[in-house]
Image (cartoon, helix red, strand yellow):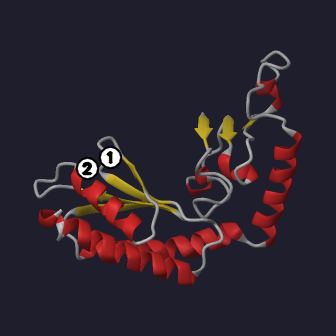
Amino acid sequence: LILDEVQTGVGRTGRFWGHDHFGVTPDILVTAKGLASGFPLSGIAAPEELMSKAWPGSQGGTYGANAVACAAACATLDVVRDERLVENAEAMGKRLRQGLEAVADRTPGISDVRGLGLMLATEFVTEDGAPDPETAARVQRAAIDEGLLLLLCGAWNQVVRMIPALVIDEAAVDEGLQAWATAVEAGTCGAAER
């Protein structure tokens, strides 16, 4: 079992690893991104028995073994531990999800709010339940007008995702939710005017 924890690792989902939510243990784990706070570093973790099957040096790459990036990773992991950022991601993720679900409850074009911790997404659909990338794009653009930089994803770009910083606090979550509610209103109810 190989798990890609490049985005979901280092606390993003409210657990240190995303797979910690599901009670599984991977044979191989790959990680990057949050590991070194944006410095180019990635890692592969596996039992010695498995890693010894590869010849020495075969696991190198662009994002491996940079001394400055390794120092950044050590510092990042210290901050994640000392500032309890995994726990913060869990708590703020619950607060954010509740707010996103409240917006979804009053918006017929939203079919789903999903994700874990501070890795959440809202899916837009048409009246007949088909993916609605046009509305998702309008909402994303309206969110930019409100100061939120969000990404589209999903097979049809019908999903808008939120991945705030692990250090986010209640005030910032609430401010973001207000901006999101305004953007959803503009992108859904105001669709005919755009």
Q: Residue at x 73, y 50 (%)?
A: 35
Q: Secondary structure at mark 1?
A: loop
Marks 1 and 2, the one that precedes in the sequence: 2
- Quarter holding the C terminus is bottom left
Which residue is at 46% across, 75% downward? 176
166 vs 185, left or right, is right
In this rendering, the answer to whether 23 lies above or below 106 is above
In the rendered image, which residue does mark 1 sit on?
Answer: 157
Q: Nearer the viewer, residue 139 or 86?
A: 139
Q: Rate crowding at label 2 as few (under 14), some (14 to 19) or many (20 or more) other CA atoms within 10 Å.
A: many
The x, y position of residue 116, in whole percent, is 50, 61
Which residue, given by chain and number where applicable, does mark 2 sit on? 133
Asked whether, in this view, residue 2 is left or right of residue 39, the answer is left
Q: Mark 1, residues whose alpha carbon is within 10 Å: few (<14), some, or many (≥20)? A: some
Quarter holding the N terminus?
top right
Front one among 117 and 72: 72
Q: Can residue 62 be seen in the rendering of this structure?
A: yes
On the image, the x and y values in percent for residue 185 come to 25, 73
Q: Amino acid at mark 2?
A: Pro
Residue 69 percent location from the top left of the image = 81, 45
Q: Residue at x 67, y 39 (%)?
A: 29
Amino acid type at circle 1 is: Asn
Front-lying residue, 35 or 27 = 35
Q: Are marks 1 and 2 in contact (CB under 8 Å)?
A: yes
